[in-house]
Image: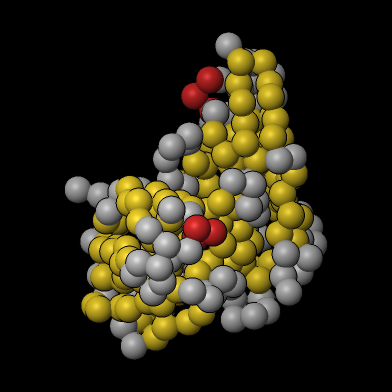
Amino acid sequence: GQQVMQIPQYQHVQEGEDFTTYCNSSTTLSNIQWYKQRPGGHPVFLIQLVKSGEVKKQKRLTFQFGEAKKNSSLHITATQTTDVGTYFCAGRSYTGGFKTIFGAGTRLFVKA
Amino acid sequence: DADVTQTPRNRITKTGKRIMLECSQTKGHDRMYWYRQDPGLGLQLIYYSFDVKDINKGEISDGYSVSRQAQAKFSLSLESAIPNQTALYFCATSDFLGVGGYTFGSGTRLTVV
């Protein structure tokens, strides 16, 4: 069945360093979404990418969708302590009734 | 008030007990979902409903059942709770196209002892 793999599982950074998490699907995706979950909180929707090669920015966050629509990345420039949490990708596949599958998430730790 | 409300927030129950987790939403979304979150495993889909008359099994439906009482209400039941059902449970909603992503509730932390 469809799988969405996300790496790394954990990332420790010093405040001010950059951070990137990667998401790879075993099947072509119709879209991919990104969520952030603060410690003790619930996932919060950040953005959706739909087009092949699409790049979107939200302040220090840059989201990319691969040309083949099978991978995506989230890059944070100059991390801040407020960036701590777990970042999830969620891919919606053309197969299997357009189900959305979540990656396992990347937990970001930021040291001040 | 929250767009998606889950009750209870925390629950400790004994093995073999029946328990119901409730979810209500004010988003006006037709689609509702129940997810389970375990450390390191992300979010696993238990059941989903695209409208009041539609119920579908997700990846891990065994041991769970659901009821869609109204467009705004979707409850999850554990008929006979077991310890490996200890987890964080999230209810979520989305519109038909899912353009705005999923809106999650605050979660129910369930412990089965």
Q: Residue at x 31, y 83 (%)?
A: B52
Residue reaching furthest bottom?
Answer: B53
Residue B89, compared with residue B50, is above or below; it is above
Instruction: Tell me residue B4's x, y (percent).
Output: 30, 56
In the rendered view, does B113 fall on the left or right side of A4? left
Residue A31, compared with residue B47, is above or below; it is above
Q: How is the image coloured?
A: secondary structure
Residue closer to the observer: B81 or A58: B81
Whether residue A56 is visible to the viewer of this picture, yes or no, is no
Which quadrant of the figure has residue A12?
top right
Which quadrant of the figure has residue A66?
bottom right
Instruction: Tell me residue A107's x, y (percent).
Output: 62, 36
Residue closer to the observer: A106 or A49: A106
Residue B70, compared with residue A18, is above or below; it is below
Residue closer to the observer: A109 or A27: A109
In the rendered view, does B24 fall on the left or right side of B102? left
Q: Residue at x 26, y 70 (%)?
A: B73
In the rendered view, does B26 fall on the left or right side of B10? left
Residue reaching furthest left?
Answer: B1
In the rendered view, does A102 fall on the left or right side of B21? right
Q: Which quadrant, please, contains the C terminus of chain A?
A: top right
Residue closer to the observer: B97 or A44: A44
Instruction: Tell me residue B58's x, y (percent).
Output: 54, 74
Whether residue B112 is visible to the viewer of this picture, yes or no, is yes
Count of picture labels: 0
Q: Which quadrant, please, contains the N terminus of chain A?
A: bottom right
Which quadrant of the figure has residue A68?
bottom right
Q: Residue at x 76, y 69 (%)?
A: A27
Instruction: Tell me residue A80's x, y (percent).
Output: 56, 20
Q: Residue at x 52, y 42 (%)?
A: A36
